[in-house]
Amino acid sequence: MSITRHLFGAALAALCSTAALAEDAVLRIATQVSGTVNWELTTIASQGLDRANGFTMQVQDVAAGPAAQLAFQAGEADVIVSDWLWVARARAEGQDYVFIPYSRAVGALHVPEGSTAQTLADLKGGQIGIAGGPVDKSWLILRAYAQQEYGMDLAAETEQVFGAPPLIFETALGGELQGAVNFWHFGAKMEAAGMRPLVTVAQAGQALGLDADTPLLGYVVTGDLLREKPQLVAGLAAASRGAKEILATDDAAWEALRPIMNAKTDAQFAALKAGFRAGIPAPGPVDEASAAKMLAIMAQLGGEELVGKMTDLPAGVFVTPGS
C-alpha cells in the first residue's frame, strides 16, 4: 500500500511538473490574423511544428501592427512581428528587444498597365499613392534611389497621396494614380490585375549598396526571454524555418491556406504564393553592415519621426538561433 501511495505520489508530481513545463512553454504571439504572417503561423499549427519544437503557440488577434507593439510592450504578448528598425530604435531607447529574421519581402513602385513610364524620372509631376505614410521604409528607399540615379527629389517633384493599403490598391487599379507604393501582398495583387513594377524596392536597395537578403521583418522577443529560455526562442526560430521549408515547395500546403489568403482570383493566389516564397530569407546571420547602411538612409530621409535620436545600429538587434 505504501509503495502504491509512493508511486501515485511520484506520478502526480511528474504530472504537475509536466503541466508546469507545458504552461511555461507557451508562446503568446500577437498579430493581425488577417495578415500574411498568419499563413506561416497557420502552417506551424497545422503541421504541429510548435509542439515538435518544444512550445505551444497561442495566437492573439490584434487590429494592426501598432496594437501588437503595445501588447508586447505591456507584457501581454511574448512575440510579435515587426521590422528591425523598430527594434533598433527601441534598443537605442533602452528597451531590451531582439529580432529573429522572418521575411525579406518588400514591395515595388507599380504603374498602370498602359503607362509609358520607364524610370522614376518619368513620374515627375504625377501622383504617387503610398501606403504607410511619409516615412514608409519602401518609399524612403525609393526616394534615395531616385536621388542617386536621376538627381531627382521624388518627394518634391511628385504629388503624394497617402492612404491605407486597401485604399491605395483600389485607387491604383482605378487608374487615378501614375504610380503606387504598397505592401508586398497588395503589390502582388496589383500585378495580377495587370499593373507592372517600375522598380522594386529590392532593386533600388541593391543600387544603393544594400544587401537584398537583409530581412526587414522578423519575430521580436525580449532579451530576458532569450537569456532565460533560449530553448523557446530556438524552438520558435526552428518552427518558423520548418514552415518556410514546407511553403517553399509544397503546393498542397498553399491550397490549405487559400481560404484565409483573401485571394479573389487564381492569378492573385499565384502571385501571393510567389511573393511569399520570394521573401523567404536565407538561413544564417543578418548582414549588419548592410543594415547599418539602411539605417543611415532612414535617418537622413525619415528623421527623428522614424528613428528617434538613433544614429548608429545598436549592438544586439539581430539574433539567429541555430545558425
Image (spheres, rainbow, N blue to C red):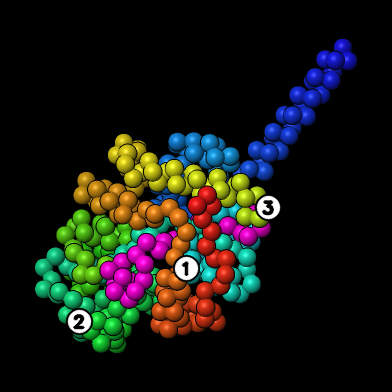
Instruction: Choose top left, top right, bottom left or bottom right for residue 6.
Output: top right
Q: Residue furthest right?
A: 2
Could you say where residue 149 lies in the image, as x and y percent from the top left?
24, 81
Q: Does the magenta stretch include residue 298?
A: no
Q: Is residue 212 magenta?
A: yes
Instruction: Residue under label 1, please give it.
Output: 288
Do callouts 1 and 3 mark residues in contact (Cβ within 8 Å)? no
Magenta span covers which residues? 202-225
The kind of residue on which mark 1 rests is: Glu
Quadrant, the N terminus: top right
- Badge 2 element: helix
Could you say where residue 199 lies in the image, as x and y percent from the top left?
23, 70
Distance between mark 1 and mark 3 Cα atoms: 25 Å
Name the foreground residue: 22 vs 321. Answer: 321
Left or right position of 52 against 209: right
Against 242, residue 171 (above or below) is below
Please tell me how crowded label 3 is: few (under 14), some (14-19), or many (20+) other residues with Cα within 10 Å: few
The kind of residue on which mark 2 rests is: Ala
- Badge 1 element: helix
Could you say where residue 155 lies in the image, as x and y percent from the top left?
31, 84
Instruction: Choose top left, top right, bottom left or bottom right for residue 113.
Output: bottom left
Question: Which of the labelled discs sits on residue 121, or is there none?
Answer: 2
Please tell me how crowded label 1 is: few (under 14), some (14-19), or many (20+) other residues with Cα within 10 Å: some
Question: Which of the labelled discs sits on residue 228, or is there none?
Answer: 3
Distance between mark 2 and mark 1 Cα atoms: 31 Å
Among the two numbered marks 3 and 2 on one chain, the one whose residue lies closer to the N terminus:
2
Viewer can see residue 139: no
